[in-house]
Image (spheres, rainbow, N blue to C red):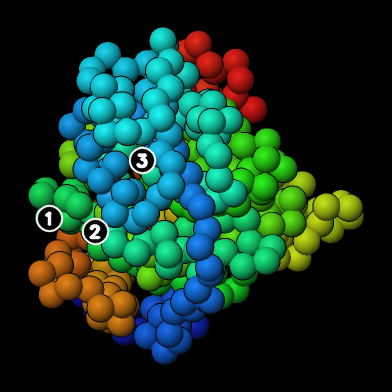
Amino acid sequence: MTPLDLLFALGQFELIQLLFLAVLLDIPRYLIAALFVAIVPPDKGTPNGPVQVSALISAHNEEKSILACLQALVANHVDQIVVIADGCTDATAEIARAFGAVVIELPERVGKPNALNIGLKEALHPVIVVVDADTLLEPNAINHALALLGPGVGGVGLRLRLRNEIVTLTTTYQAIEYRVMFSAGRRLEDALGILPNISGAAGLFRREALAQVGGWDCEVAEDAALAMKLRDAGWRLRHADAATAATLVPETVTGLLLQRLRWDSSVVTIWWRKFFFLLNPASRRFRPLNLLTSLDVLVFNVAFPLILPFYIWWLWGRVGSVSLTLLAAVLVALTVINVVILMLVRLPLRLLPYVPYHVVAQNLLMRPLRVIALLAEFVFSISRYDPYIPKNQRDKLT
């Protein structure tokens, strides 16, 4: 009997059993989000009157990027720019000062979250926009974000696109990923009121909200920690799909893997260790939407990835080498599903030929890496040794 004969001999229920992980991982989370994006127009909010805005940029040796970032902020009519030169040994501070920014020079690197807290003390205005030095706000990005900064909203995330979209296969993989994760996914989370994060690359906040929660915690995922602190304090978070920022992503496989080790380990440090109490209905700080937010993150980013190795082991025990045929069929099916999703979110045609590569990389490289990162964080707390936080600041890790 050939592998295909065996598969055709299986009953419908048995096939669903064999395919359940792929179904659970991909169809609900991404296809529903894409359908939502295709059917429901983005919420553009209500235009606000004149609002004064301060910008914060934490920069460590960013002389090649800082000028373009500053120019993009001025084009968005920012009233004040504060650059925190975080232990820079290049011309970052001189370029920013010559441009007219307020420059805070730190003699040694303290890391992005600590640098932002220092810069926040110099910010003069009620709205704070935070951008990375390699991120460029597109025209009217701040106005689009301000339109969603209504009563009770503490922060607004921007839609990210890549400046280095088709430079290497690694950036092309991320270009497709960002179209789904940071566009379709964020829009659905925004509509449901369960937005779990505002990317550290570009975000807009009420100064009042930042002050109430004490600014940024010293964390390898300071953006996620801040978002959950704001949610816990009762502030709502929004996603402005019309507000776009262009950022740079790792161009090598090594750079991407190191970044994702940090991102994936932060799921444990933030949503499991730090904010697990949000799952407790008996807590006085319990809020149903925060429960759903945490469950969304923990189920899809912790539970399912950790099930993956056991699923493959069970699959091999059930059908033996036929599992290879089945997994190949799953990859083909996922490719078709991803093409549908990406067409719904209007993926540029230049990226469509790379969808099979994206599916293979996502399932055979990135998901196993997430399992490694989660287990390493649970067992060894690897985030405490990540160079994102300088050694002299790691005692502040919470």
Percent of width and height locating residue 311: 46, 58
Percent of width and height locating residue 335: 24, 72
Front residue of this view, candidates 123 and 273: 123
Residue 189 in view in this figure: no
Q: Residue furthest bottom?
A: 39
Residue denoted by label 1: 166
Please report whichever mark, 3 or 1, sits nearer to the chain's N-terminal start. 3
Say what secondary structure mark 3 lies in: loop
Neighbourhood count class around disc 1 (C-alpha, 10 Å): few under 14, some 14–19, many 20 upward? some
Percent of width and height locating residue 131: 39, 44
Question: In the rendered image of this protein, does residue 337 appear above or below residue 267?
Answer: below
Q: CA distance from mark 3 to mark 2?
A: 18 Å
Q: Residue at x 13, y 75 (%)?
A: 349
Please report whichever mark, 3 or 2, sits nearer to the chain's N-terminal start. 3
Front residue of this view, candidates 147 and 252: 147
Q: Residue at x 36, y 40 (%)?
A: 132
Q: Residue at x 67, y 47 (%)?
A: 208
**Residue 279, located in which quarter of the rendered image?**
bottom right
Percent of width and height locating residue 61: 27, 23
Neighbourhood count class around disc 2 (C-alpha, 10 Å): few under 14, some 14–19, many 20 upward? many
**Residue 216, located in which quarter of the rendered image?**
top right
Front residue of this view, candidates 231 and 128: 128
Q: CA distance from mark 3 to mark 1?
A: 21 Å
Whether residues under marks 1 and 2 lie with C-beta atoms below 8 angstroms apart, the answer is yes
Question: In the rendered image of this protein, does residue 375 appear above or below residue 111?
Answer: below
Residue denoted by label 2: 175
Q: CA distance from mark 1 to mark 2?
A: 8 Å
Residue denoted by label 3: 132
Q: Amino acid at mark 2?
A: Ala
Q: Amino acid at mark 1?
A: Ile
Say what secondary structure mark 1 lies in: loop
